Image: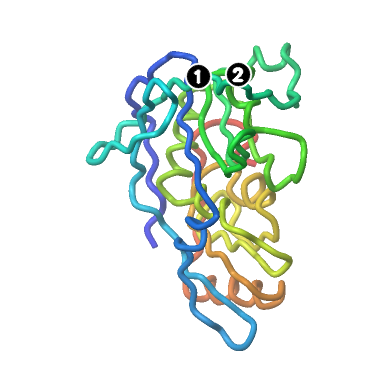
């Protein structure tokens, strides 16, 4: 498998109070599953790599509309919904002023209850709207001081299907095998996958349902098949550690 290609060349993003935001329903998760059995009680999914991301544009009411045939990342203005109550912020305002972008890897829409991911230019009225206190699986996010790095990380996650993997249901037997990423290996939670295995970037991940021992056996098999590769750093930061 060829290493994931990265690029620092980005179109200039639109700069309103804006987000690139995606919703999904539970029925979409199920329809995206591609599984094959590995003995009784085990389901093993092949590596999932999404097609290039399709940008969205937002109507004045805030609904999403697909734009086919373009790869330009569009940041969309979405106004606050009438009657919505913002969740309690989990980042102090003084700290929020240090950052220029926020990526929500897995959050929840406060009104519709749908899983959501997006890249935001504001904390208040932006990323904080989709990060309620609750299950840690629903609170995967990160602030960025560097706009270019934030855009690149988001593009990688979108184009390699990481956001789709995060939206899929999981249980105690779900393991994430990073075949290509910053720290290849076996991870047992979505949070560990994003923060440790991928270091907030994209990559090639296999969703494996089974015991930890079976997942480790699968990872060792991939090593023998020379299908494991480590991404190189694209910036000088703790993400390279």
Circle 1 packing at 10 Å, graded few (<14), some (14-19), many (20+), is few
Q: State which tag comes first along the sequence, 1 or 2.
A: 1
Residue sitting at the far front: 83
Residue 123, x across and y down, in percent: 62, 20
Please identify the quadrant where the N terminus is shown.
bottom left
| Left-right relation of 228 to 69 | right
- Residue 215 on image: x %, y %: 64, 72
Q: What is the quadrant of residue 71 in the picture?
A: top left
Q: Which mark is residue 236?
A: none
Q: Secondary structure at mark 2?
A: loop
Q: Left or right: 59 with respect to 228?
A: left
Numbered label attached to residue 125: 2
Which residue is drawn at the image coordinates 56% and 49% (left, top)? Answer: 182
The picture quadrant where one finds residue 108 is: top right
Separation (CA) of disc 1 from disc 2 = 9 Å
Q: Residue furthest left?
A: 69
Mark 1 — residue? Answer: 79
Residue 93 in the image: state x and y as whole percent.
72, 13
Image check: 228 left or right of 132?
Answer: left
Q: Which label lies toward us, 1 or 2?
A: 1
Q: Residue at x 58, y 38 (%)?
A: 112
On screen, residue 143 above or below 28: above
């Amino acid at each position: 498998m060829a290493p994931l290609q990265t690029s620092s060349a980005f179109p200039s993003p639109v700069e309103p109070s804006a987000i690139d935001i995606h919703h999904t329903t539970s029925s979409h998760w199920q329809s995206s599953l591609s599984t094959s059995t590995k003995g009784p009680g085990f389901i093993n999914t092949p590596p999932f790599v999404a097609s290039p991301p399709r940008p969205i544009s937002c109507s004045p009411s805030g609904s999403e509309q697909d734009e086919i045939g373009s790869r330009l990342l569009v940041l969309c203005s979405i106004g606050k919904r009438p009657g919505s109550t913002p969740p309690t912020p989990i980042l102090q305002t003084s700290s929020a002023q240090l950052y220029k972008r926020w990526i929500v890897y897995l959050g929840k829409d406060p009104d519709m209850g749908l899983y959501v991911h997006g890249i935001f230019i504001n904390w208040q009225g932006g990323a904080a709207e989709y990060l309620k206190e609750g299950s840690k699986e629903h609170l995967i996010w990160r602030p960025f001081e560097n706009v270019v790095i934030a855009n690149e990380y988001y593009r990688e996650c979108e184009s390699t299907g990481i956001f789709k993997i995060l939206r899929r249901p999981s249980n105690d037997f779900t393991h994430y095998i990073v075949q290509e990423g910053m720290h290849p290996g076996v991870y047992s939670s979505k949070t560990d996958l994003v923060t440790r295995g991928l270091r907030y970037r994209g990559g090639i991940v296999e969703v494996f349902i089974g015991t930890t021992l079976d997942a480790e056996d699968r990872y060792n098999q991939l090593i023998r098949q020379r299908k494991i590769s480590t991404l190189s750093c694209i910036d000088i930061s703790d993400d390279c550690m």
